[in-house]
Image: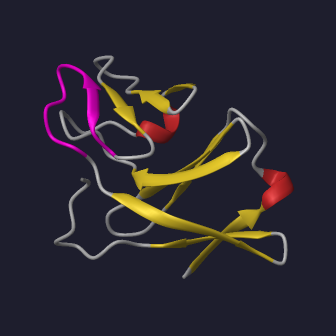
Amino acid sequence: MIPVCRLEDLPAGEAVRIDTTPPIAVFNADGELYAIDDTCSHQDASLSEGWLEGCQVECPLHAASFDLRTGQPTRPPARRPVRTHEVVVADGVIHVRPAAQEDTAA
């Protein structure tokens, strides 16, 4: 498990990037926490810098969109999903359990 930040340090509507290999983005979507690979599957752009609306994030580069719950693209030009990762809050600290490298989003 990778510690990310204190829960109160990630307000609703915000995201934080974890510099892992590959990088992971953690989102607070109206109080629900989600973690996905930070790099858009269409082109090299940081999804943590994108626009969050509900459970979807829009890539800041070409407006591809991904469902944070599944990692599936919801709008082109992205066609491949990004991996999702487990998020756990323990003692007020957000942690991420990265998915195995070979795992892909469902």
**Residue occupying the point 75% across, 37% down:** 12
**Residue occupying the point 20% across, 34% down:** 43
Question: Residue 17: horizontal and vertical position, in percent?
Answer: 53, 53
Residue sitting nearer the eye, 68 or 18: 68
**Residue occupying the point 22% across, 73% down:** 101
Question: Residue 51: horizontal and vertical position, in percent?
Answer: 52, 23
Q: Indicate left or right for 100 with 12 as reference.
A: left
Q: Main secondary structure of the magenta part?
A: loop
Write down the region rendered in magenta: 71-81
Q: Indicate left or right for 38 with 7 as reference.
A: left
Residue 29 position by quadrant: top right
Question: Is 39 rendered above or below residue 64?
Answer: below
Question: Residue 89: horizontal and vertical position, in percent?
Answer: 72, 70
Quarter holding the N terminus? bottom right
Question: Residue 83: horizontal and vertical position, in percent?
Answer: 30, 56
Tell me if residue 72 is in the magenta stretch: yes
Q: Indicate left or right for 22 with 57 as reference.
A: left
Question: Is 98 rendered above or below residue 6?
Answer: below
Residue 24 position by quadrant: bottom left
Tell me if residue 27 is in the magenta stretch: no
**Residue occupying the point 50% across, 40% down:** 48
